[in-house]
Image: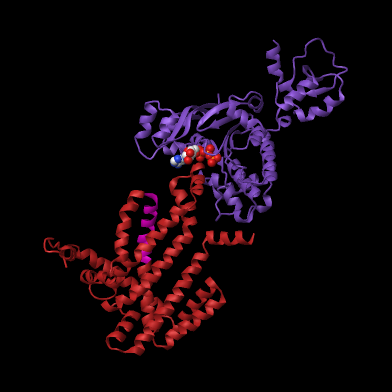
């Protein structure tokens, strides 16, 4: 069962009450809604997020990412549609049950950190536990444990104002992790950080994720970031989800021009893996002469072997079994963003 | 003068009969309020005047030192000794007692009102014009009905002071809470904290600088009003100044006025010092040094 499921979720902001219901009821289009003076922030979003998955929502500023995310923990109520979180239909929950759900199932990391300036780092990290009434000694101990996990043990008794941006966001992360919820919502959590620090934070998130196994919904407007950390990516445009797919699918098979323009500048050699571009093995190949590469190796790692090997590279799985081959031509085409393995296969067949 | 064709609307008469009605029907309530305020002020006056004058002066200067440093402590010491040597100490302490009592009551009413107005737009829209009214109506006007509702003495002065000093207390509390970064409140909500807890542990602490500015304003307005209240028998420095004016006694009028100024400076700096001790103010300072 998916950990999060959104079914036809829409959010329309309007200053005139009653107008929204009418717009939805009459099935107005985005243009009609805008013409009526309302803002269609999210329109008909449907997706599932599986347990343990990092699901990235990507789109330009104003495309409705934050609004969509805020509907996943009820900070914002959908105009229509349904949201299921951890098996509960949250759109019908009362205020108390909703709070309860936020305390035990969903925590959040904010773009501008949203740390409380008047509380020490450890008190900030303990906030989620405080909100659910955990006794002081216990919550501070747990907060220290999670500060250790993000490498901030020595800073526990400082104030947030004394920390650098990257450190502050690690406090924000520790605060969310200390809640020990299954779901983590991250709204442009790394966007306010310098590129180098952002990269560190991405690495740290990925390595934490390997041991913590959370269900993460991560918002970004940076495609490179989306590709780096996302298991799957949803691309949003003007309130609508225009494509959902793995980074490779988005890259190799963009749903429309909008997505295609987005992915044009991505470093393909870092995102695409051998598996994504390999051709079927064809006639019996023996694995003695070929250079073998892992199916999960990014293309960047294939360049040297391909240059040195006179014959196509052999792609092998984790067990060493042969999965496919990559001739130099295929590799070059993939890097240039031309045809890929699957497409060629189709066009040949 | 109103135009002839315009009927004279007796707003003032209506107000007067309202006050009359209150005097006749709610007398027990006003008596009770009077008793409470009267004994509260008496207790404060006793507290300020019972110890030897120099001990009280030392204590007040010590408070100034603790809150703002030795320089201000020293200045307070000199200024307070000056009040005593002008022979105004008793009057000053009874004024101070009035200011403290009125400010305390004002705070107790203004703070919850400010919180409510910050959290409820409708309530805020209703309260705002009332506050405007209270603040812009010339302060003397409160004194007349106050004297009718309570007997002459300190109580009408306190009541008029409370009405006069209330608006900035409510406003600055409301403003402070509304100005708290919405992300902070959202963070509280996002972790499932109940609204009351978000209010008490996030919004109010973060609004503290503004709330303390409100406290400062309330106390300063109370002091200015207490002087006016001297005219209706509230005594203290107001009485001294009033007497100086009516008897054309420039010397004692000036001494009373100077003592008011000294009290004002002292109270202003001390409340500002209190504001600087709030958690947020300390955090801001720490951030600057980082
Ligand atoms: N509370 C609100 N009231 C009215 N309109 C809103 C509200 N919140 C968001 N909107 C509008 O909804 C649209 C989507 O906003 P949203 O914040 O979800 O976009 P976003 O993709 O997160 O953008 P950004 O990258 O700038 O954070 C915008 O046009 C915004 O102006
Ligand atoms: Mg946003």
Location of residue B127 by image quarter: bottom left
Q: Colour of chain A?
A: purple
Q: Is residue B285 above or below residue A170?
A: below
User: Dividing the image into 4 quarters, which one contains the N terminus of chain A?
Assistant: top right
- Image position of A180 (left or right of B266): right
Q: Position of residue B139 (x, y in %)?
A: 29, 70
Residue A165 in view: yes
Q: Is residue A249 above or below residue B93?
A: above
Instruction: State which region is magenta.
Output: B104-120
Q: Position of residue B201 (x, y in %)?
A: 49, 52
User: Dividing the image into 4 quarters, which one contains the C terminus of chain A?
Assistant: top right
Residue A101 among magenta residues: no
Residue beneath the point at 37% across and 61% down: B108
Q: Position of residue B31 (x, y in %)?
A: 23, 68
Name the residue nearer the viewer: A175 or A277.
A277
User: The chain coloured red carries which letter?
Assistant: B
- Image position of B88 (left or right of A168): left
Q: Is residue A133 above or below residue B237?
A: above
Name the residue nearer the viewer: B280 or A43.
A43
Q: Is residue B141 above or below residue A252?
A: below
Name the residue nearer the viewer: B205 or B176.
B176
Residue B112 among magenta residues: yes
Q: Position of residue B13 (x, y in %)?
A: 15, 65
Most common secondary structure along the magenta stretch? helix
Location of residue B11 by image quarter: bottom left
Location of residue B149 by image quarter: bottom left
């Amino acid at each position: 069962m998916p950990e999060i499921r959104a079914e036809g979720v829409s959010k329309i902001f309007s200053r005139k009450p009653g107008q929204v219901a009418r717009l939805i009821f009459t099935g107005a289009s985005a243009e009609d809604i805008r013409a009526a003076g309302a803002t269609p922030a999210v329109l008909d979003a449907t997706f599932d997020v599986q347990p343990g998955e990092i699901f990235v929502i990507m789109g330009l500023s104003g495309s409705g990412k934050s609004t969509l995310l805020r509907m996943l923990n009820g900070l914002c109520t959908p105009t229509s549609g349904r949201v299921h979180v951890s098996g509960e239909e949250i759109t019908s929950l009362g205020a108390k049950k909703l709070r309860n759900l936020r305390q035990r199932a969903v925590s959040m990391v904010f773009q501008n950190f949203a740390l409380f300036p008047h509380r020490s780092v450890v008190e900030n990290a303990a906030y989620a536990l405080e909100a659910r009434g955990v006794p002081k000694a216990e919550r501070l101990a747990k907060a220290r444990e999670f500060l250790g996990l993000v490498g901030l043990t020595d800073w526990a008794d400082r104030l947030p104002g004394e920390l650098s941006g990257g450190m502050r966001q690690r406090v924000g992360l520790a605060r969310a992790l200390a809640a020990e919820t299954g779901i983590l919502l991250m709204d442009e959590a790394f966007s306010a950080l310098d590129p180098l620090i952002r990269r560190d934070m991405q690495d740290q998130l990925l390595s934490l994720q390997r041991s913590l196994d959370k269900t993460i919904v991560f918002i970004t407007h940076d495609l490179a970031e989306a590709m780096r950390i996302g298991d799957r990516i949803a691309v949003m445009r003007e309130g609508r989800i225009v494509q959902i797919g793995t980074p490779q699918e988005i890259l190799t098979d963009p749903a429309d021009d909008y997505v295609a323009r987005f992915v044009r500048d991505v470093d393909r050699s870092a995102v695409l893996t051998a598996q994504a571009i390999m051709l079927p093995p064809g006639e019996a190949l023996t694995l003695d002469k070929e250079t073998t590469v892992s199916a999960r190796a990014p293309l960047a790692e294939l360049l040297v072997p391909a240059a040195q090997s006179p014959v196509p590279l052999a792609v092998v799985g984790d067990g060493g079994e042969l999965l496919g081959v990559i001739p130099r031509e295929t590799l070059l085409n993939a890097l240039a963003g031309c045809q890929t393995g699957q497409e060629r296969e189709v066009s040949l067949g | 003068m109103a135009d002839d064709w315009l009927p004279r609307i007796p707003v003032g008469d209506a107000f007067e009969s309202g006050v009359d009605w209150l005097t006749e029907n709610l007398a027990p309530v006003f008596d009770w309020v009077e008793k409470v305020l009267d004994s509260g002020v008496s207790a404060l006056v006793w507290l300020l005047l019972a110890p030897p004058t120099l001990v009280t002066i030392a204590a007040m200067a010590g408070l100034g030192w603790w809150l703002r440093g030795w320089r201000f402590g020293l200045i307070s010491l000199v200024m307070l000794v000056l009040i005593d040597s002008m022979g105004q100490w008793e009057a000053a302490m009874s004024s101070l007692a009035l200011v403290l009592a009125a400010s305390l009551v004002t705070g107790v009413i203004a703070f919850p009102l400010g919180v409510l107005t910050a959290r409820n737009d409708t309530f805020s829209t209703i309260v705002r014009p009332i506050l405007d009214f209270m603040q812009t109506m010339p302060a003397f006007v409160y004194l007349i009905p106050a004297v009718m509702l309570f007997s002459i003495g300190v109580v009408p002065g306190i009541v008029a002071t409370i009405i006069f000093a209330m608006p900035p207390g409510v406003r600055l509390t409301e403003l402070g809470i509304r100005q708290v970064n919405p992300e902070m409140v959202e963070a509280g909500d996002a972790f499932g904290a109940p609204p009351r807890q978000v209010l008490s542990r996030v919004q109010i602490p973060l609004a503290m600088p503004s709330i303390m500015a409100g406290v400062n304003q309330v106390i300063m307005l109370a002091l200015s009003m207490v002087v006016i209240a001297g005219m209706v028998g509230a005594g203290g420095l107001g009485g001294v100044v009033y007497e100086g004016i009516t008897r054309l006694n420039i010397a004692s009028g000036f001494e009373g006025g100077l003592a008011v100024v000294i009290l004002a400076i002292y109270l202003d700096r001390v409340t500002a010092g209190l504001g600087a001790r709030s958690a947020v103010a300390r955090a801001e300072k720490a951030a600057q040094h980082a």
